[in-house]
Structures are given as structure tokens and as C-alpha cells.
Image (spheres, rainbow, N blue to C red):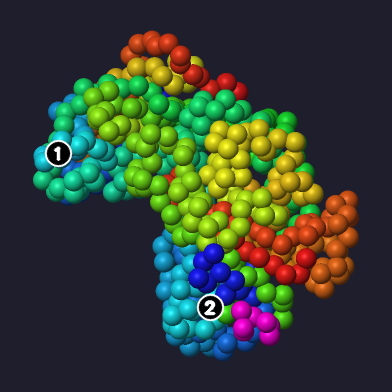
Amino acid sequence: MPGPIDYSKITITPDFDTAEWWMGTKEHKYLARQCKDCGHKWFPPFPACNKCNSMELGWFETAGTGVLHSYIVVTQPILGAFVEAVPYVVGLIELDDCHEADGSLVRVGGVMLDDEEDVAIGLPVTVEFEQTNEANIVVPRWRISGTAENTWKFRE
Amino acid sequence: MGALTDKYCIVGVGETPHMRPSNRTTLSMACEAVKKALADAGLEPRDIDGMTSYQAGDSTTSNHIATSLGMQLNYSVDILGGGSSTEALIGNTIGLLEAGYCKTMVIFRSMNGRSGRRMGGQAPSGPVPPTRAAEDNQFMMPWGWTSPAQRFGMSAMRYLRDTGTTTRSLAEIAVAHRYHASLNPKAVMRHPITIEDHQNSRWVVKPLRLLDCCLETDVSACLIITARERAYDLRQPPVFIMGGTGRTMSPNAAWNYSRPEIHYVAGNYGRNRLFGMAGISQKDVNLISCYDAFTFTTLIQLEAYGFCGKGEAGEFVKGGRLQIDHELPSNLSGGHLSEGYTHGVSMVIENVRQLRHRADDACPGWAEGKHSYDRQSSCRQVKDARIAACLGWGTETMSSSAILRGIAA
């Protein structure tokens, strides 16, 4: 579990391309961009489909589950907001339901609620949403949700 | 071979000392670097009619330098960028000279990289005050994932898992570059280190330790490029530009993390262009500068540019292979890990000096190309240095490069 994160020291500024995504987190939805013409899914929400170039876009509500593809353990804070949070784990999560036939997939980052000792590449994870103390921003975080075979853990 | 291979040359190099802090403006430092490069080349300010630079909103501009030094430029453009910009601007410069926009051109970077704006955004004294998470950073900063070490660390961790490489291979790179710094009077960190020193250094962000990370310094560094016909009349043996690439991308370049392999980096996509244009192979290269923002960036670029096979870099670097007098000496000045941090220019400068056979070391006759090759006496000139590869790094998904050839060895 990371220490407290002081969100008053980060001003998140949703914009034309991202405002609806941040609205989604308030409803506890982890959204991916989806092309209305060809169905392709991606993240972050770049404003055109890189497969068919359509700009007719919607959102896909993911299950908020995935597999830990990689991680880092931050021991030295860079941002003021995270001074009390170290050490904390940032995970790279491969979402379960954004795989496409041509191999395209979606991976997203996020703070892990687990301690370093409990984290391993290959483990299943699930999202949780945290209301911050600031301006209606809800932030997704992730937690190990089960076990798996062939996991890998960084050994010093 | 490329249509312009060997047609343009690097004829002057110069830099300020690496300072922490400089207590100077980026303009003042840049003027010093440009003046030193002019003197090195045997040129006057009036001989320069083109200038270009890169920065991250943290530096002076070409027109301020031109004004300070009494130049009137026919071409001047300052771009945004960090690592990988040096070689990209060498490419721009060749195109501009060939097209006749100008005749002799300066490339510079000037940064208070320690006392001013630090990469990753932290304040000079520590963590940053309140900040804005906008654009792509909306999907990184709120989860505490911002600095280059944190970003590249994610790819490094997966690389260790996928290849079975250990951090002792990262240590080999830190040790090699530090050894070279011990032979470089200009280097900030000159005390040799061991693999154990690396293994015992503190964590910054796992899997990267303090000795995996480059320095942060205040410095300006400068190159001067012109056509070979002009170069023949100047002070130094010319160094010919054989080929290069400029910010070559991988697919999905603005979001590395959804690519099938997050450590299959951009150099893989630039390598054939680089060696094809230069008309040589990896086996012809005598020394490299391999961008060392972190030990990992050097490691992964060895694979990307084909000096070893995929997944083999961890074995390749063992036994001091990247050290002087070994097979592929890397970052002879000490690189960003141990000499100082210039976003790449200083690595190209060192290669130029090596190819001139005029590494500015402890040998009394270095300026005339007289070297002892005695490492105990701090000679850092590579014997028979003829071809150098400059392997720049911006991110996993963005890479620039250049191959240089000298005639003095």
C-alpha cells in the first residue's frame, strides 16, 4: 500500500480529447477509446482511429481487469504529491478485453495498492476508484486480484 | 551509400565545463561554447551563416547568440527536443547546406540541466511544487509515473523478465563509462567504480539504481558543420558524416506501452537506413557513443542497432567489451553517466575528437595527435579510430543516429 498521495499538488486538466474519460472515472468506469466505424480500441484517447483514420469515436467500457505486464518501484519521489507515498509500485496493466484479432492491445499505467512483495508480472489485477480531495477528480488505482502460473518478480 | 555520404564534415567542436551549478545564463554558456568551436575550427563568427539548436523551453535561442557574437544568419531555427536531437539536427543541417540555405552551420544545446529545469520536472532542490497534468501526462503524472527513470524503468523491468538479463549487466555499462571518465579531465565523476559499487548503490526506481542514472549538469556544447571542400582548408582533420537517421519512430510512438514488446526500441527501425546510407556494417565500427541517459538505454541500443542479437546484450557487455582497448569501446568521454549531461552533443563531440586522433587527455601532445595509449598515464585515445557510430536515444520509440569517419588515425 502506498503512503498518502497529496492530489492537491497535481492539477489534472481534462481537455477536448480526455474530458469524457475523466467523467467516466467518476462513474467508476475505466473507458478505452473506440472507433465507431471499425471497432478498434485504444488508449490514451488520441483523437483519430489509427487503423481507419475515422474521427467518429465512442467509448468502450472495459471490465477494469487485466494482467500485470511490468512494474516499477518508486523509492525516490519526483513529484511533491508523492513525497509521502514512497515506496510505491506503478503497474503497467494489459487490459483483458481490448485484444483484437490483429494482435493490437491496450496497456495502461496506474498506482498499485499492493506492496512490492506482493506484486509480480503475470498476476491478474483489477481496478478500484478513489475520490481525491480535489475538484471532482476520481483516480483509478489497481490491485492484485488473484494468482497465476509463471509469474515473475524482480530480485535484487 | 547515401547520395550525400562524406560530402559534409564536422569541423569544429566546443563546450563549456560541466558545472553544478553554473550561476550563468544559457546564453552566456552558449556564447562560450560557440566561440570555442569557432576557435577549434579556425573560423570567425562572420563565417557562420546558419544556426540551429534544441531545447525543452529551457534555453536561449540562435538569434540571441548571433546578436551577442555579431553574426547575421541566413538560416536559424530552434526546435523542441531532448536526447536524439543532436543527430537529427545533423541530418537537417546536411539538407540545408545541400539546398543552399546557408554555408556553414552551428548546432548547439545550452542547458542549466541541474540548477534550472531538470528532466522529469523536479525542482533544483527536490520534488516539484504543485504542477499541472495535461495532455499525455494526464495518464502518467496522476499515478506518479513521470521522470525518465520511471518511464524507461518500466521497459527495463520487462526486458529483465523477458531475457533473463540481470542488473550486473547494467553494472558493466556503468563501470565501462566511468573508466573512460577516469581518463577524461573534463568529466564530473572520475573515480573508478566496480560492479559491486553499482550493486550497492541506492535505488532510484527499481530496477534502476543511482549508478544506472546519468548526471545532471549545467553546460553548453556546440558542433560546426560545413561542406568538405571548405573543411579541407580548416584547422582540424575533417570528420566526414557518412550517414544518419533523425528521430526514427517505432509504431505507436506517442504511447510505447501498448506495443507488443515495449523494449523493441526505435533503433530497430532505423538501423538499416543508418548502415545502408553509410555503406558499412557494424563490424566496421571502431567505437560508439551509445546514449546513456541510463545504463539500460545503452544496453538496449546495442541490440537495436545490431551490434548483438535480440536479448543478447546482457552477455555482450560482459568482460569489459565496451571498454577502451576492447572490442567496442563506448562513450569514451564517460558519457552522460559520468562526464556530464548535454542531451547528446558531448557524445558526438567526443567521437569527433577520437576520429581526429586528438582526444583531449593527459598526453602532452594530444593537440598534435600524439598519444601514448598508456591508460595508466590517462591516455584515452582509441588506437586506429576510423569509424564511430553515434547512437542517440529520445525514448523507446524515438531514436536518431549518425556514422562518422575520420582520416587521422
Where is residue B155? Give x, y as percent: 47, 35
Quarter of the image where one finds residue A56: top left
Give me the C-alpha separation between circle 2 and circle 1. Answer: 48 Å
Q: Is residue A125 visible?
A: yes
The C terminus of chain B appears in which quarter of the rendering? bottom right
The picture places residue B171, in percent across and down from the top left corner, at 67, 36
Q: Could you say which disc has been placed on residue A38 in the image?
A: 1
Instruction: Name which quarter of the figure residue A80 lies in.
Output: top left
Residue at image coords 24%, 46%: A50
Q: As drawn, is B265 to the left or to the right of B203? A: left
Asked if residue B227 is positioned above or below residue B110 in the image, the reply reads: below
Task: Examine the rendered structure and indicate whether residue B267 appears above or below residue B195.
Answer: below
Point out residue A150 in the picture as x, y percentages from the top left corner: 46, 14
Q: Secondary structure at mark 2?
A: strand
Image point (67%, 55%), residue name: B284
Callout 1: chain:
A
Q: What chain letter is assigned to the residue under label 2?
A: B
Within 10 angstroms of label 1, few (less than 14), some, or many (20 or more) residues? some
Region in magenta: B228-234
Q: How far across and how far down the image is residue B98, in percent?
A: 48, 78
> Foreground residue, B319 or A71?
B319
Instruction: Report the amino acid beneath label 1.
Output: Cys
Q: Is residue B114 visible?
A: no
Q: Which mark is residue B224?
A: none
The verdict on residue B292 being magenta is no
> Is residue B128 positioned above or below A82 on the image?
below
Residue positioned 47% across, 37% down in the render:
B263
Q: Mark 2 highlights which residue?
A: B105
Q: Amino acid at mark 2?
A: Met
